[in-house]
């Protein structure tokens, strides 16, 4: 088995592009979002989720 390129995702991890506030795949979904603990809920991705 040849090694994966350095920018390849780990085996079993799949990247999907689209609107994370409206997933299109069937079945359960997990959206991982990493953020800092400063500021407040009200900007960026969390604001988009709040509006949904």
Image: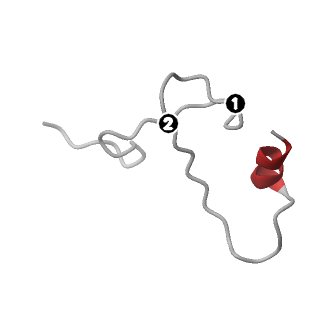
What residue lies at 85% left-to-right and 58% top-to-bottom? 43
Q: Are marks 2 and 1 in contact (CB under 8 Å)?
A: no
x and y percent of residue 7 in the render?
Answer: 42, 46
Q: 35 or 5: nearer the eye? A: 35
Instruction: Give the side of residue 40 with respect to residue 20, left or right.
Output: right
Q: Which of pointers 2 and 1 indicates the residue nearer the eye?
A: 1
Q: 7 or 47: nearer the eye? A: 47
Is residue 8 shown above or below 43? Answer: above
Q: Identify the mark at residue 15; answer none if there is no mark.
A: 2
Between discs 2 and 1, the one toward the N terminus: 2
What residue lies at 55% left-to-right and 51% top-to-bottom? 32
> How far apart are the alpha carbons under marks 2 and 1?
15 Å
Q: Identify the mark at residue 22; answer none if there is no mark.
A: 1
Q: 5 or 14: nearer the eye? A: 14
Number of numbered discs overlaid on the protein picture: 2
x and y percent of residue 33 in the render?
Answer: 61, 55
* Quarter that holds the C terminus: top right
Q: Quadrant of residue 46?
A: bottom right
x and y percent of residue 36 in the render?
Answer: 68, 72
The residue most toward the left is 1
* Quarter that holds the N terminus: top left
């Amino acid at each position: 088995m040849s090694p994966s390129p350095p920018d390849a995702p780990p085996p079993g991890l799949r990247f999907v592009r689209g609107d994370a506030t409206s997933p299109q795949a069937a079945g359960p979904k997990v959206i991982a979002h990493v953020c800092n603990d400063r500021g407040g809920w009200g900007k960026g991705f969390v604001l988009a989720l709040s509006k949904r």
